[in-house]
Image: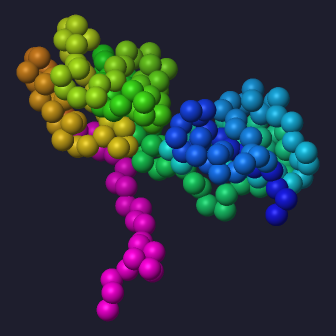
Amino acid sequence: RGYEIVMIGHKGHPEVEGTLGQARGGMFLVETPADVASLQVADPDRLAYVTQTTLSVDDAARVVEALRARFPNITGPKKDDICYATQNRQDAVKILAPQCDVVIVVGSPTSSNSNRLREVAENLGVPAYMVDNASEIDPRWIADSSRVGVTAGASAPEVLVREVVERLKDLGIGSVADLDGVQEKIGFPLPRELGNPR
């Protein structure tokens, strides 16, 4: 339809790289409000934005605000295309971290949303460490800690979280308490073509 597209996301993320590759021009990547300030577009009235699906609402909000301030007629998605699992986890870390001496994030170092969880805790002044599995926990991280928080990236299997909790118990963290979080009840129906044959 003749629109240029701004993608809010992280350079190098597979989804971003794939989307930019499919677009073959006419699409710009922005990561920060500073990127928005330097953005040069052909027609500010024919501009739309999308977001990397694993960004949280918080991660995207500052950039969307900058886009709307600079390009008041920019069009956004009809429905949020933000990953609620990512946002829910970040919101939980904002509650968890202030109650802890240390936060352990179960997730891959290449996972964008796992890294954001670590950053959220650190931005609240709480040391945070990321582990792929329980064997990566350094006992020095928790040596002087009475409360250790554990969270996990959106794609980390529950079994890894349980193993991390067990390892922390082995290292002397005595009791475990679960924090109530948001129940994720979003469902995604199968396309008709893949539905039950009758």
Q: Is residue 100 visible?
A: yes
Residue 119 in the figure: left or right of residue 99 = right
Q: Is residue 94 visible?
A: no
For residue 82, side relative to residue 108 (left or right): right
- Foreground residue, 178 or 37? 37
Residue 86 lies within the magenta run: no
Residue numbers of the magenta segment: 178-198
Question: Which x, y percent locates residue 179?
Answer: 28, 39
* Residue 176, horizontal then vertical, whole percent: 16, 31
Q: Is 76 located above or below residue 20 in the figure? A: below
- Indicate the quadrant where residue 187 lies: bottom left
- In the shown orientation, is residue 160 left or right of residue 89? left
What residue is drawn where x is 21% and y is 36%?
160
Quadrant of image for the C terminus:
bottom left
| Residue 179 part of the magenta segment | yes
Q: Looking at the rendering, which quadrant does residue 70 occupy?
A: top right
Q: Nearer the viewer, residue 162 or 43?
A: 43
